[in-house]
Each structure stands twice: as C-alpha cells, then as structure tokens.
Image (tube, helix red, strand yellow):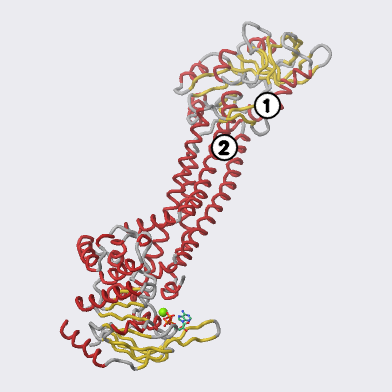
C-alpha cells in the first residue's frame, strides 16, 4: 500500500499545472465555504449581540401570563423592584446584571400634536450594565438619574414630534386603575437602532419618573438579565425559573425574538446552497483531471497489468491519486481560509448592515467550527467519489487494448 | 514437457461489423531454454501471438498449455498472477513507468507481489549490473537513451525469475548498433540463465543471431522451423534442467 501511495503522489505531481488547477478547484471550494461561513457566523454573532447586549438582554422575567398580553403593556402583572427576587437572581453564578423595568403605553405630546408611544422606565445604572450596547446608535445623551425627567425617544418619533435635545413636552398615561396622568419630560437623545417599530414608538425614561407617573412606586413589570456567556443562557434561565416558581415566566432572547434565529438559519441555508455549487465545480474538476490521467496513461496501465498488477490495485492507485488531490486541496483551502479569517478578525471585521436594519454592524468573521468538519468531509469524500469512476474505468481496461494505445 | 504448447490457435478481432482474423490456426511448441525468433511482416500477427502466449489475451479457439496448464479459461486475476510469476515482457516502446527510477522500475513486478525488499534489492542490483545499468540506478526513464531504457525493461522482465520472456519487436525503436547490443544481451541472458525467450521481429538481420526461427505470415505459421536449432534448444533445456 505504501508503494501505491508513493506512486500515486508522484503521478499527481507529474502534470504540475493540471494538479495545481484541480487542487485549486477543491481548495477554492473549501476556502469559499469557510470564508462565507465565517461571515455568516460573524453576522449571526453581530445580530445576536445586538439583541442580547443592546435590546432585550440574555433573558427576561415577567409575571406569569405577561407574554400573552405583552402587546398591551399591562400594568397589573407587576412585582416589587427590590427584595429577594432581585438579589437572588444576581447571586446566580454567571449572571452579570439584572435591570428592573416598567413598561407601559401612553401618549407623547409636544403641545400641538400627540402620538401613541411605548415607554420603558429604566434604572440607567442597572440597564446599561445589562445592555452595554443599548446606546450604540444614540444621538445625544443616555438616560441619567441626575436628570429626573430626561427621556430618550426613537429617532422617527422625535422627528415626527419635532423634538430636539433640550426641548420637551408631556407624556400621558393611564394608571392601573385607569386614571390619566401626565408629566413633563425633556428630550436627552434620539435612538436610531435600526428597528422601525422602536424608532417610531419607543421612549426610554428613568424608572423613578415612570413609577411616579403611574403611581407605582417600587413596582416594575419586567427584569432584563445579562449573563457572562451566551452558551449558559438556557441553563441560567431555567435556574431562575426554578428560583422564582410558577408565578413568574422566564424567556430567553431566542423566545423573545424568534425571527433572529430564523434569519440566521436562512443565511445558513443560502450558504449551504452556494457551497454545494462550489463542491460540484470541484468534483467536475477532479473527474476531468482523473479521466485525462486515465486516458493519457492508458499504455502505462496496460504495462502495469502486463507485469501482473490486479484490477483492484489499479483502482486503488487511482483512488490514492484522488486522495492526494483531496488532501492537498482541502488542506490548502483550509489553511488559506484560516489565515484570511484571522487577518480580517484582527483588523476588527468589516462593516455591514444586518438584513432589515439601517444600523451598521461590524461583522467579525469567526472560524465556523460547526462547518469545519462537514466542509472538509464533503470536499474530501466528494473528491474521492469523483475519482471513483475514472479509477473504475482504468481498471476495466483490457490489457491488450491498453498496450496498443499510443 | 514443453513450456509452451499451442494447438490450432485462432484469434479474430471484431472491428465494427467486419471480423479481422489475426491468427488462422497456429501450432507451436517451445521448449524450456529455447531462444525463438518469430519473424513476420507488419500485420502478420506477431503481437497477437505473443499476447496469447503471454496470457495478456485469450485465443478465440484452440488450446494453449503453459508449462502443462491449460490457460484458456482462467479469469483476469488468475492470468495476472500467471504473468507476474512466469512471464516477463519486453516491449517495442519500452513501456517503463515514467515516475519510477531505474531501480524502482526493475523492482515493480516484484513489489506488487509483495516481495521482501532486502532480498529483492540484492537481486535487482545484480541484474542491473548484468545488463549494464549500474551507473544509472537513480535515473528516471526520460533521462535514459533508448538502449538504456530497453535494458531496464530487460532487467524488469528477468527480476521475477520467469520461465518465459516475451520480447515483441524490442529492437524496432533502436538504431542498428544498439539493436545488436540488445540482441546480444538477450542471447547471453538466455545462455547464462536458461530463461526461455520468444522474440518477434520483422527485421531479417536478426536471423543471423537466432538459433530457431519461426515465420508467420497473414496469421499462418509457415513451417520454417530450423530443426537443428530446435534440437539444440532441446539439448540446452535438457542440460539446464
Ligand atoms: N485489438 C485489435 N482489434 C482489431 N484488429 C486487431 C487488433 N489487434 C490486431 N489486430 C489486427 O490483427 C492483425 C495482426 O495484428 P498484429 O498486431 O498481431 O500484427 P503484428 O505482426 O504484430 O504487426 P506489427 O509488425 O505492425 O506490429 C492486423 O491486421 C491487425 O490490424
Ligand atoms: Mg506487433
């Protein structure tokens, strides 16, 4: 077998330009698959980071039943913003922050016109620890307890009401009992985070101010929680659910924003389709190369048969040649891909827009580990399968005819 | 027992719809140790005959016994084994394996049958010396002259210690001086090793060297057997075995 492998390697290297072309085709397929894969992973990471670190947190806690009616921002499913719940969640290993929120709907008015809004009251010290990227796309200043009535509006909303930083208006909302109340606010900044709904409707205010407006001192409707690692989220969420019992519901970012996963999976599907095309091209290259080799070396095959080589050994020889092409091709594709991914990642990635979003993300390509094995395997097995037919053809040759070939 | 026994061997090829009859009933007996020249013009059936004797091809009809064994109904791998064990081939266009050097080319038939490397290498070097290749052992075929390449082929044919060496027009691609050297070398190996040679050619000059000449024309063996030479072959074989 060792002899066959050595012979196969030499035969592959015999026609260097053709070997280079074939290895290039395989390598290119592997390279493109891994590069595209690395950007899909990078894009997915960016989208998930935006959700987890900029919008919803790793998971959220509400009173039982909240998710069924969350569109109405109900106030009667509330709970205390201090006490055992909060401090116990904070103590769980891997939890890095807990931000209490009071979410409600109301009207924002600038004196001449008013519009429907969804308001989130936050404690900036907690909120910005849980969501370090919350204000990445903020024009102006974040919410600050030092300015008790300082609010952030969605960009479109601020524009629609003609509000600029420093100007203000009133926010009106109904308390739990249905009593309308209004308070003056001052605009601190406008947030354009790429989400159309949030840009048109959302307002962020200090928690105390919101509680004051609604007459709900010490009460909240939502906890946003952040974790050390993204992988631990489901486990920690389950732990928190356990801790709080059946009166509460815990939902991870995946459950809160299911479309993000859909987008990521769709990207993977497109990637898979593109990569299959590369693989097919590489396989055609291999079949072509190997058929040429069989054709050119017909007399040599006849000679090997004449001196007593069995048919299956001839097949093996050509399969080893395909294997050689596969090893060099996948190896070089892998090496180049890793080098490029590493280099781009070190430069900080490339700027891009996530689908359906105006926000600019930096996509940092990451080695697509879950793609690595399937890609290399597909390229490898594909190459060898591509070599199978030519190898079989070679072994089926009649020695006399093969020896007569020119 | 004769080494090669052909009885009424016929061979036809199907070329599209027409049938080409290459051998029209050939009888031939070759004894151990003989050096037989098959002489015939182009297209007369020399290659066809040697291919059948060499178990590369099967006759359409007739009986072929090699060393007493009927060859007619063996399958491919069986025949490959027979060729590897009992027969050496020397071709007109050398047919060396281009990616192997001289030593590797010579050893190839033994390597594919899994022979012990050390003993093989010793034997290879000895044969290489005998055919005058010692200075070229690490050379690749394309770095050798035609005569040198044919010496490699001869060494490759002999290294398996076959009973029979078939040389199909081995001198046709060589200049006459080199051709003479190659013929002399084969005669010498025949004498010294007692290996049976069958040598085909259309070059009448080769007759000067031959002890036994059989003539083939249009697929028919003319009985040009030189009885005395045949007898000499028998004697030689008798002494050698
Ligand atoms: N595989 C084949 N298919 C069809 N016809 C063949 C085949 N092999 C040989 N022939 C025909 O059989 C006849 C004998 O051919 P063969 O090659 O045995 O002659 P040869 O004496 O070796 O000739 P040359 O001196 O040209 O080598 C020729 O007419 C040839 O065309
Ligand atoms: Mg011929």
Query: Could you say where residue A171 lies in the image, as x and y percent from the top left?
Result: 74, 13
Count of labels in the image: 2
A281, above or below A102, in the image:
below
Q: Are marks 2 and 1 on the same chain?
A: yes
User: Seen from this angle, which residue lies furthest top?
Assistant: A146
Q: Position of residue A27 (x, y in %)?
A: 49, 47
Disc 1: which residue: A194
Residue reaching furthest front? B177
SS type, badge 2:
helix
Q: Is residue B160 left or right of residue B49?
A: left
Q: Secondary structure at mark 1?
A: loop
User: Observer-nearest residue: B212 or B175?
Assistant: B175
Residue B95 visible at all: yes
The disc label shown at residue A51, or none: none
Q: Is residue A83 left or right of B32 when viewed as pictured?
A: right
Q: Is residue A342 left or right of residue A220?
A: left
Q: Quadrant of ligand 1?
A: bottom left
Chain for disc number 1 = A
Write down the residue under mark 2.
A40
Query: Where the N terminus of chain B falls, by quadrant?
Result: bottom left
**Of all residues shown, which one is farthest toward the right?**
A112
Q: Position of residue A229 (x, y in %)?
A: 48, 27
| Mark nearer the N terminus (2 vs 1) | 2
Q: Foreground: B207 or B213? A: B207
């Amino acid at each position: 077998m060792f002899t066959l492998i050595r012979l196969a390697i030499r035969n592959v290297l015999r026609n260097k330009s053709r070997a280079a072309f074939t290895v290039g085709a395989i390598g290119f397929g592997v390279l493109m698959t891994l590069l595209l894969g690395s950007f899909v992973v990078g894009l997915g990471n960016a989208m998930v980071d935006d959700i987890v670190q900029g919008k919803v947190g790793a998971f959220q806690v509400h009173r039982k039943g909240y998710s069924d009616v969350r569109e109405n921002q109900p106030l009667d499913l509330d709970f205390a913003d201090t006490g055992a719940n909060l401090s116990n969640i904070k103590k769980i290993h891997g939890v890095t922050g807990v931000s209490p929120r009071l979410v409600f709907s109301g009207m924002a008015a600038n004196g001449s016109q008013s519009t429907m809004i969804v308001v989130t009251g936050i404690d900036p010290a907690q909120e910005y620890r849980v969501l370090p990227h919350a204000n990445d796309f903020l024009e102006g200043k974040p919410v600050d307890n030092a300015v008790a009535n300082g609010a952030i509006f969605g960009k479109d909303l601020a524009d629609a009401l003609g509000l600029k930083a420093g100007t203000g208006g009133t926010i009106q909302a109904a308390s739990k009992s249905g009593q309308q109340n209004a308070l003056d606010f001052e605009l601190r900044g406008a947030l354009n985070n790429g989400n159309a709904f949030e840009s048109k409707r959302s307002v962020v205010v200090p928690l105390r101010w919101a509680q004051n407006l609604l007459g709900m001192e010490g009460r909240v409707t939502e906890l946003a929680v952040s974790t050390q690692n993204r992988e631990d989220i489901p486990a920690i969420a389950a732990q928190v659910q356990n801790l709080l019992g059946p009166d509460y519901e815990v939902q991870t970012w995946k459950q809160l924003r299911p479309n993000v996963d859909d987008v990521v999976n769709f990207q993977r599907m497109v990637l898979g389709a593109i990569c299959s095309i590369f693989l097919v091209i590489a396989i055609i290259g291999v079949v072509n190369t190997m058929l040429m080799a069989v054709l050119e070396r017909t007399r040599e095959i006849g000679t090997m048969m004449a001196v007593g080589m069995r048919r299956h050994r001839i097949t093996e020889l050509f399969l080893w040649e395909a294997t050689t092409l596969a090893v060099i091709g996948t190896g070089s594709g892998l090496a180049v891909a890793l080098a490029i991914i590493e280099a781009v990642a070190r430069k900080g990635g490339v700027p891009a827009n996530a689908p359906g979003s105006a926000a600019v993300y930096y996509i940092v390509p990451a080695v697509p580990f879950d793609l690595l094995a399937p890609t290399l395997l597909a390229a490898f097995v594909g190459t060898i399968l591509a070599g199978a037919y030519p190898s079989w053809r070679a072994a089926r040759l009649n020695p006399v005819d093969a020896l007569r070939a020119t | 027992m004769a080494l090669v026994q052909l009885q009424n061997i016929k061979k036809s090829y199907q070329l599209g719809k027409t049938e080409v009859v290459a051998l029209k009933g050939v009888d031939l007996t070759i004894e151990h140790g003989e050096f037989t020249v098959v002489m015939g013009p182009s297209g007369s059936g020399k290659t066809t005959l040697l291919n059948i004797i060499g178990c590369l091809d099967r006759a359409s009809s007739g009986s072929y016994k090699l060393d007493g064994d009927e060859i007619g109904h063996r399958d491919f791998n069986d025949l490959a084994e027979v060729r590897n064990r009992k027969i050496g081939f020397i071709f007109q266009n050398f047919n060396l394996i281009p990616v192997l050097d001289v030593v590797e080319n010579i050893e190839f038939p033994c390597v594919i049958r899994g022979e012990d490397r050390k003993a093989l290498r010793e034997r290879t070097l000895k044969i290489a010396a005998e055919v005058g290749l010692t200075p070229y052992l690490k050379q690749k075929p394309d770095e050798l002259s035609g005569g040198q390449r044919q010496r490699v082929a001869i060494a490759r044919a002999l290294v398996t210690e076959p009973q029979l060496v078939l040389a199909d027009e081995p001198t046709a691609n060589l200049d006459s001086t080199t051709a003479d050297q190659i013929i002399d070398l084969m005669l010498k190996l025949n004498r010294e090793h007692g290996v049976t040679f069958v040598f085909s050619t259309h070059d009448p000059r080769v007759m000067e060297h031959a002890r036994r000449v059989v003539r083939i024309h249009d697929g028919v063996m003319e009985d040009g057997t030189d009885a005395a030479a045949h007898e000499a072959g028998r004697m030689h074989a008798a002494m050698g075995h």
